[in-house]
Image: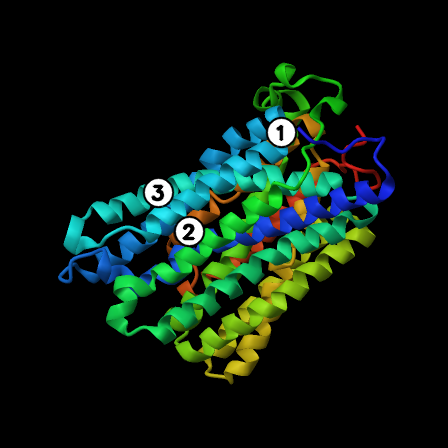
Amino acid sequence: METISSAMPRPAVEAERRRAVIGGILSTFVDSYDIYLPAIVLPAAMGYFEPANLPTAIKVTFTSLIFTATLIGRPLGSPIFGHLSDKVGRKRVAMITAAGYTLCTLIMALLPGYAAWGYWPLILTIVLRLIDGMFLAGGYAATIPLALERARWQVRGRVSGLLAAAAPAALTAINLVLLFALHITTRAGYQTWGWRIPFLVGVGLGVMFLLYYSRVSELELEQAGESRAQRRPLRELVRGNNLVVMAEVALLSSGYWLAAQMVVSYLPVLLVGVLHEPPTAVGQYGFFTGFLNIAVMMLFGLVGNKLGSRRLMLLTGAWTASVAAILWFLMIHLAQVRASFWWVAVLAFVAHSLVAGTLGALFAYLNEVFPTRVRSTGFSVGYTIGLIIPGFYSVWLLGLSHWVPYAYASVVLLALGGLMCLAGTWLAPQGRPRQDLLAE
């Protein structure tokens, strides 16, 4: 398999670096598109998969299960594909997992409805999303470490910011495709076939990624001093110092995602369902902030390049627990006293940016703290395990409502997430901020 060789001329080496970085950006874009695809596209089409007389609460539950299955699949797939990525090669695993989630999306796009197969299409959708989530975790495990390993340390933060920026770019793309599908179909047409358009676009993106990544060279794993047959990445990760680092990374990752769930996933529900802001205004806010957050994450990557990703992670944990939480409190208060939505949106966006922008530094830092032989395993497990506790944020909000007003419960979780991120980063090691990731 093709690898980067020390004997290669410099222009060829730089070309390989660029391919790996662009491949990582494409992977993050396709991954984010695929993850949020059913959550954004299917709510308006669930009548195709369910009987018309089904209670509303059951319909909402089924819709939520489709998205939740993907999130559950990621922690299941990360140790499997992270281990394989460290053992058999980053590129090989990236190609396998991309083919897997592309196939899953294609099958979902071709499923019949309740009228033809009863509940089976809905059950198959949930199962396919679980498998899809496992493959998507493998994409993270291979392409992001390879992109950061190929990048020179002087630009690693910038690369991390570009990788992170692909996520809000993908959300914006889904909304554009959805608007197109809704525009060219009637309501009945969307429920029958219009919803398939965004899914088929996702299939096309997966094929494009496979074609591009076939040109990326493999990482020469033997350069770390071991043959592939000798590697036991998952076993090494749960032993000695690696296990300690893994626990610290899980803490900071859980903290980041707990805060991020408040400012990303819960925000529309909070503004519309709890604070009774106009849905149209909230929708416009979400669309425009998607564009702005691309720039925010790139900016965080650049700052992380100057300060060091660990130092920036410490700062973001501290200001999430303080500044962002205060702004969130003020946003809720202004909404309750019926202040102009413009002021509510500004406070929401600043708090959102302080939290979500952290992803621009998080990718770089998580890859700096693990050695090459367990990097994919450590990064993918640490990153995805942080989704588990925050994934139940609706339960934690309901529990907190016994002590604080429900509208303000998210302030508590936002501050708690910042403190967890700060503590995890403080405990975790410095990593390799001033050297290439392959300089073991």
Q: Which residue is found at the position 52% from the left and 66% from the top? A: 172
The amino acid beneath tag 1 is Gly
Q: CA distance from mark 1 to mark 3?
A: 26 Å
Residue 236 to residue 274: above or below? above
Q: Give the residue at mark 2.
A: 396
Residue type at mark 3: give it: Leu
Q: Quadrant of the N terminus?
A: top right
The residue closer to the viewer here, 433 or 77, is 77
Is the C terminus in the top left, top right, bottom left or bottom right quadrant? Answer: top right
As drawn, the label of residue 89 is: 1
Identify the disc placed on residue 412: none
Amino acid on which the number 2 mark rests in the picture: Trp
Judge the density around disc 3: few (<14), some (14-19), many (≥20) Cα neighbours within 10 Å: many
Identity of the residue furthest to the left in this view? 53
Lower sequence index among marks 1 and 3: 1
In the rendered structure, the answer to whether residue 276 lies left or right of residue 20 reads left
| Residue sitting at x 34%, y 53% | 109
| Element class at badge 3 | helix
Q: Which is in the foreground here, disc 3 or disc 2?
A: 3
Residue occupied by mark 3: 128
